[in-house]
């Protein structure tokens, strides 16, 4: 190989590296600009300029929620004027006598979410008594996350079908 051919190869390599660096720099600048634009739009939305709650929440759920939720659980006419169930029906206080519950209201939906949170706490306490572990002696991060999602959905299902009456009591106290 002659010195000229080695120098030519070096120049090609050098220009290739410079070209790759320029592309990477341009890509990074573009990403920084779009991130800065995103931050500015979020700041504008926080000030209430362009954001409405209907854009953020659709039927009580955020984009990416993985649980089924309580929106649309009760829709019939009978649900608008129903009697308390569970613990609310069994309470000895006179305060709940002759009171009805509108299970189609947003207040009742939020009461169900709070009851579901209490059920999830109960399930987590029960889960902590189990001794099951992974093959290597401890659970992986993915396994822990999956179990947490599973218990979230189980809490929602138990709240919908369990008739604990906690949501009814919360609704009657707040209505």
Image (spheres, rainbow, N blue to C red):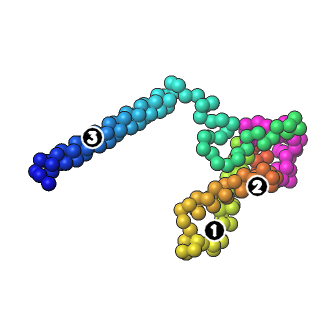
Q: Is residue 175 visible?
A: no
Q: Which mark is residue 128?
A: 1
Q: Which mark is residue 174?
A: none
Give me the residue at 60% from left, 44% from top: 64
Tag 1 secondary structure: loop
Query: Disc 1, disc 3: CB below 8 Å?
Result: no
- The CA span between labels 2 and 1 is 19 Å
Quadrant where the C terminus is found in the figure: top right
- The CA span between labels 1 and 3 is 56 Å
Crowd around label 3: few <14 · some 14–19 · many ≥20 (10 Å): few
Query: Disc 3, disc 2: CB below 8 Å?
Result: no
* Tag count: 3
Give me the residue at 82% from left, 37% from top: 75
Q: Is residue 126 visible?
A: yes
Counting from the top left corner in percent of width and height, residue 23 is at: 31, 39
Counting from the top left corner in percent of width and height, residue 125 is at: 66, 65
Quadrant where the N terminus is found in the figure: bottom left
Give me the residue at 34% from left, 40% from top: 28
Residue identified by numbered label 3? 19
Q: Which mark is residue 158?
A: 2
Give me the residue at 54% from left, 74% from top: 136
Q: Tag 1 or tag 2, which sits nearer the N-term?
A: 1
Of residues 95 and 127, the one drawn nearer to the viewer in this rendering: 127
Magenta-tinted stretch: 80-109
Q: Tag 2 or tag 3, which sits nearer the N-term?
A: 3
Closer to us: mark 3 or mark 2? 3
């Amino acid at each position: 190989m002659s010195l000229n051919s080695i120098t030519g190869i070096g120049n090609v390599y050098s220009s290739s590296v410079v070209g790759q660096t320029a592309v990477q720099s341009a890509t990074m600048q573009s990403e920084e600009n779009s991130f800065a634009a995103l931050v500015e739009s979020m700041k504008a939305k926080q000030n209430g300029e362009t954001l409405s709650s209907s854009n953020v929440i659709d039927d009580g759920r955020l984009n990416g929620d993985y649980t089924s939720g309580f929106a649309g659980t009760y829709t019939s006419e009978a649900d608008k004027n129903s009697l308390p169930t569970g613990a609310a029906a069994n309470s000895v206080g006179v305060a709940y006598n002759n009171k009805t519950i509108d299970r189609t209201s947003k207040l009742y939906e939020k009461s169900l979410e709070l009851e579901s949170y209490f059920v999830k706490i109960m399930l987590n306490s029960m889960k902590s008594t189990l001794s099951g572990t992974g093959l290597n002696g401890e659970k992986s991060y993915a396994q822990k996350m999956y179990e947490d999602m599973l218990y979230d959905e189980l809490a929602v299902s138990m709240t919908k079908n369990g008739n604990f009456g906690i949501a009814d009591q919360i609704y009657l106290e707040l209505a």
